[in-house]
Amino acid sequence: MPEEHQDRKSDHLRINLEEDVAFQRLSTGFERYRFAHCALPDIDLQDVDTTTDLLGRQLGFPLLISAMTGGTAEAGVINRRLAEAAQGAGVGMGLGSQRAALEDSALEGTYRVRKVAPDILLLANLGAVQLNYGYGIKECRRAVEMVEADALVLHLNPLQEALQPEGDTAFRGLLSKIEKVCRALDVPVVAKEVGWGVSGDVARQLAEAGVSAIDVAGSGGSSWSEVEKHRARTLRQRDVASGFVDWGIPTVDSLLMVRRATPELPVIASGGIRTGIEIAKAIALGAAACGVAAPFLPAAAESTAAVTELIGVLRDQLRIAMFAAGARDRATLMARPLGAVRRQEAWAADAGERAHGS
């Protein structure tokens, strides 16, 4: 079984680095929105404050390097490079599923990054469905303690499991077990999809179960059905997986659904976010922070310096977008009328209403 997990992890890394696994027609939804440009921002660029708080920790800017990998030697190198860069930039990081290390302690080192990143917000990770396959509070605590994490992500991936030949598809009764974990752990629990979004109804159920945050991980970026298509062992499995290339809730729509359903919970926007401008849009729409994964994988395969450079580009884009929208900080970005995100077709109507005082 551990060897099977390592093979799967290796397949996922290779496919994401070498194959086109993007959604074909479904977008994240960010392109539907534009900031109203502020030609007179009344702030200096150096005044823009990108810091934010998430799960009791401060981030230099609202970025989480999203969960990607672990469980193989190559994955261990990638995780260390990601963590080193996250430490330098003051951003957060999520680890890949730690199931492999729980079942083979020799793999624990591929996830341990605290030596190179002692100060970052670090999220441990397990598949929620494993709670229906013998895992419990003990394993959740072990995952957190193994990497000295600040929180535990329980990821939700029913479609991915259904498309995997070796997938675990017993999801019945899972919510009550998630609730028990939330009550028992001493660290926050984050519920996270893996790329098909979270609906408002599911968000309400998760909030009632006690999760501390929800990562929507919407559709529009990398498609794990496409990843599983490339892993298919038979033509039939490949054909089945290919039918789901545009399944899911686009990231923006999922973010708005979850914000409306659970206004008291921090929401992490992820799924296809590629620029600091999209991070700014997500924050303006109510996200507490944003997760980015796919662009960091080839960077981490290259070097820590490449990851650091990518983080710097995202941070600069975010700062300049906030400056050009007249927003000094996250609160201003969310509340200032000229800084709020508007649908492009509504600009003229909005401007007319303001001009006439209506």
Image (cartoon, rainbow, N blue to C red):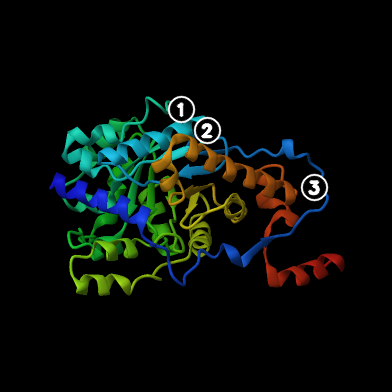
Q: Quadrant of residue 303?
A: top left
- In the rendered structure, find residue 90 and report the number of the disc placed on it: 2
The residue lying furthest to the left in this view is 1
Q: Which residue is mark 3?
A: 41
Q: Is residue 45 visible?
A: yes
The percent position of residue 101, horizontal first and vertical second, equals 22, 38
Q: Nearer the viewer, residue 110 or 194?
A: 110
Residue 354, image x and y in percent? 82, 65
Q: Which dot marks residue 280? A: none
Q: Residues within 10 Å of mark 3 (few under 14, many from 20)?
A: some
Dividing the picture into quadrants, the one containing residue 180 is top left
Secondary element type, mark 1 = loop
* Image coordinates for residue 127, horizontal then vertical, percent: 28, 50
From the viewer's perspective, is 4 left or right of 50? left
Q: Which amino acid type is marked by label 3?
A: Pro
Residue count near mark 2 (Cα–Cα under 10 Å), binned few <14, some 14–19, many ≥20: many
Q: In terms of sequence position, does the residue under pointer 1 or pointer 3 come before the other?
A: 3
- Residue at point 54%, 39% (across, down): 309
**Closest to the observer, 232 or 149:** 232
- Decide if residue 265 is in sight here: no
> Which secondary structure lies at badge 3?
loop
- Give the mark count: 3
- Tag 1–tag 2 contact (CB < 8 Å): yes
**Disc number placed over residue 119 in the picture, else none:** 1
Give residue 197's quadrant in the image. Answer: bottom left
Q: Are marks 1 and 3 in contact (CB under 8 Å)?
A: no
Q: Residue at x 57, y 40 (%)?
A: 312
| Nearer-N-terminus badge (3/2) | 3
Q: CA distance from mark 1 to mark 2?
A: 8 Å
Point out residue 184 in the picture as x, y percentages from the top left corner. 29, 38
The C terminus - image quarter:
bottom right
